[in-house]
Image (cartoon, helix red, strand yellow):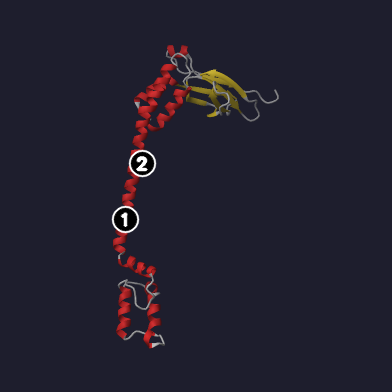
Amino acid sequence: QRSATAEQLRKSLRGDLDWSVMKALEKDRRRRYGTADGLVMDIARHLNHDPVLARPPSKLYRFGKLLRRNKVVLDAAAVVMAVLCAVGLLALLFFHHQARIRWAREELLPKIDRILGEQEGHFDNVDAYKLALEAEKVIPGDPRLAEFFKNCAVKMSIMTEPQGATVHMKDFKTPDAPWEYVGVTPIRDVRLPVAILRWKFEKGGYETVLAACTTSDKGRWDKGRPPYTISRVLDKKGT
């Protein structure tokens, strides 16, 4: 205790020492310490983090003393528990990720393959494209998935005059479906599903444009040409 400050000593003695002083000053001799050694022994108990005789032996008080006596052991146990919890959490996340990878490879990829086989020649690959997007979140570098994207997706650019129009799209087969945000023009090399899509172009002060066109250009694909560009001219409101 020699290295402790006055404030630290006062805090460490507060409580037990108060009870010891009150016991030593009791008017009733039967409730006082029998001898000076009794007071010295109580102080020794306090320093050893044992319950003092001057204080009522409540369960909470005794439990607090037990914690103080075994602080090093309890601190070590807490560290071990924290490490075990961290390792357990990492293991749980690892096994969950592995399960997701198996799900993507064993369920999603065969399903995409089946849909593309059924839709061959129809150029309507929205369903396969959406499943491929889900698989990409789990297995982004999978070569089989990359091959699927070559068959069900295309990169293209979207332009408007003037620029700055917000573009949304959705599957032509589902007119009541919510619009999906694509971006703000000019949009370059955006990946989209090979399909007939509904389009919406919006810009403040201009008429909203609703259109439908396909992202599949069989002629360009057969000749190895790059994807084409969708362009729209917006009319000012009131014109």
x and y, in percent, of residue 74 in the image? 31, 61
**From the image, which quarter does the N terminus lie in?**
bottom left
Tell me residue 167's x, y (percent): 56, 27
Establish if 221 lies above or below 95.
above
44 sits left or right of 127 in the view: left
Pointer 1 residue: 79
Looking at the rendering, in which quadrant would you find the C terminus?
top right
Foreground of the two, 127 or 51: 51
Numbered circles on residues, count: 2
Residue 23: quadrant of the picture: bottom left
Q: Which mark is residue 93?
A: 2
Q: Is residue 114 visible?
A: yes
The Cα–Cα distance between marks 2 and 1, rounded to whole angstroms, is: 21 Å
**Amino acid type at image mark 2:** Leu
Q: Amino acid at mark 1?
A: Val
Residue at image location 33% in from the left, 53% down from the top: 82
The answer to whether residue 141 of the structure is visible from this angle is no
Nearest the eye: 28 or 66: 28
The answer to whether 144 appears left or right of 152 in the picture is left
For residue 235, the mark is: none
Task: Indicate the position of residue 105 as horizontal and vertical percent values.
Answer: 35, 28
Name the foreground residue: 214 vs 108. 108
